[in-house]
Amino acid sequence: QVQLVESGGGSVQAGESLRLSCTASGSSSGIVAMGWYRQFPGKQRELIAAISGGGTANYHDSVKGRFSISRGADRQVVYLQMTSLKPEDTAVYYCKSGFSPWGPGAQVTVSS
């Protein structure tokens, strides 16, 4: 079963950028289709970006035009490039592929 671990979170000012990474282990085929989710305190996780096996990307309206999902050539890592960050993007970010268990998440904090 593939295991996914998020990294790259941190604290930034509004308008700055961050790149999150989702690294796979336990699967020779790597990451095919997967999604990035985020969770606000006291709320359920929401899907904000997804990439299909063929490379098609889809985004939640709240991040469209600012976030970009991409996959490494070896399919062992998927990135979420986040630009023009806003305080309302502050959340814990998770990646998930199929039935993979939830990882520890990456905290992103954006201050005004």
Image: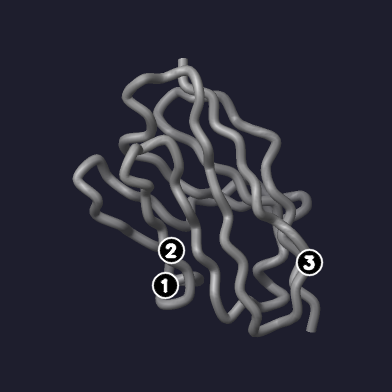
Element at label 3 = strand
Q: How many angstroms separate mark 1 from mark 3 (CA)?
A: 21 Å
Tag shown at residue 75? none
* Other-residue count near label 3 (Cα within 10 Å), few / some / many at <14 / 14–19 / ≥20: few
Tell me what residue is drawn at x 43 percent, y 56 percent. 49
Q: Nearer the viewer, mark 1 or mark 3?
A: 3
Estimate the x, y position of residue 26 in percent, counting from the top left.
48, 18
* Other-residue count near label 2 (Cα within 10 Å), few / some / many at <14 / 14–19 / ≥20: some
Question: Which residue is the site of mark 1?
Answer: 64
- Asked if residue 34 lies left or right of residue 89, the reply is left
Amino acid type for the residue under numbered disc 2: His
Q: Relative to residue 52, is residue 58 depicted above or below?
A: below
Question: Which residue is the site of mark 2?
Answer: 60
Question: Do tag 2 and tag 1 residues touch (Cβ < 8 Å)?
Answer: yes
Tell me what residue is drawn at x 48 percent, y 57 percent. 48
Q: Relative to residue 95, is residue 13 depicted above or below?
A: below
